[in-house]
Amino acid sequence: MFFEDHREKLEAQLKQVDELIAKLNTRAAKTKGLPDCGIHVSRSNGCDQYYWVDRVTKKRSYVKKKETDTLRRVAQREYERDLLRKLTRLRENLHLFLSHYDIGGIAQEYAKMAQARKTLINPVVLPGELYAEKWMEAVYEPMPFYENSEFYSDGGIRVRSKSEILIANQLEKYHIPFKYEKPLYLDGLGQIRPDFTCLNVRTGKEFVWEHFGMMDQMGYVNKCIAKIHCYQQNGYIAGENLIMTFESAQEAIHTKEIRILIEKLLL
């Protein structure tokens, strides 16, 4: 098993909370001239009616039409006060939680063991690097190559096209663990062979990478659309666990595009 470390996301959330608290405190300073009273709302003859409520005596007085703007500002102030209290509690809880948050320590329980002891253990949780090693060790039967042309990545992986060389080379450059044409079963299609199956070592998430290379041929395009629909029906969503690249005879795939996808989804 692999546990994703969410500390960065939690710290980013905490930063958002801090920024919103600061914004609300600035806005609160501009409402000091408003009456310090509550608002009561009732309904009569299908219409909303508003009343000022004295905080001490709880006495109500009808809000006059000319006071509508003040009513809105007081209502906004009350809403922002409640929001500020909730955000302040959330900030305190996030600080406390982060002070005890140690997902990395769980995986290190196995990593810090002596090698002799590791041989006795079947780890439940693995650190990212060891998880990637185990992931790469999985064996599958490769598809045969019948074509005469031979395309190899810089790391020696044989692929079927020059475009796939570009993808494989960038995956190798970024040290992304990947498998070429690893079998995958999809309801509606059966067993298929995605071009690349990649692992994000930081999150432990697998991504299927399909390159569609003849998008100017209508018969091929229709097959691609059917395949993409099948991916989606099986829970593979672009940007979440599916990467797709496209090209035609007029528009080739670019290395920059590949790098952007890798940096966004696989690092």
Image (cartoon, grey):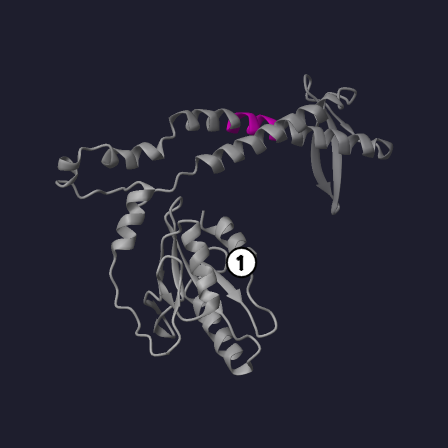
Q: Residue at x 55, y 65 (%)?
A: 253
Residue 16: image quadrant is top right
Q: How many marks?
A: 1
122 relative to 216 in the view: left or right = left
Residue 85 shown in magenta: yes
Quadrant in which residue 127 is drawn: top left
Which of the two residues, 152 or 122, is positioned nearer the viewer here? 152
Residue 211 percent across, percent down from the top left = 47, 67
Residue 241 seen by the camera: no
User: 90 left or right of 171?
Assistant: right
The furthest residue to the top = 56
Q: Is residue 146 visible?
A: yes
Locate residue 183, reporting x and y percent. 32, 67
Element under label 1? Answer: helix
Query: Horizontal and vertical percent for residue 139?
Result: 24, 61
Tell me what residue is drawn at x 68 percent, y 20 percent.
55
Magenta segment, prevailing SS (helix, strand or loop): helix
Residue toward you, 174 or 62? 174
In the rendered structure, which amino acid carries the disc numbered 1? Thr
Residue 114 lies, in percent from the top left, at 17, 33
Q: Which residues are magenta?
A: 83-90
Who's the residue at 62% across and 27% down the image? Answer: 21
Observer-nearest of 72 and 199: 199
Residue found 74% across the figure and 29% down from its top:
74
- For residue 178, above or below residue 229: above
The residue wearing badge 1 is: 255
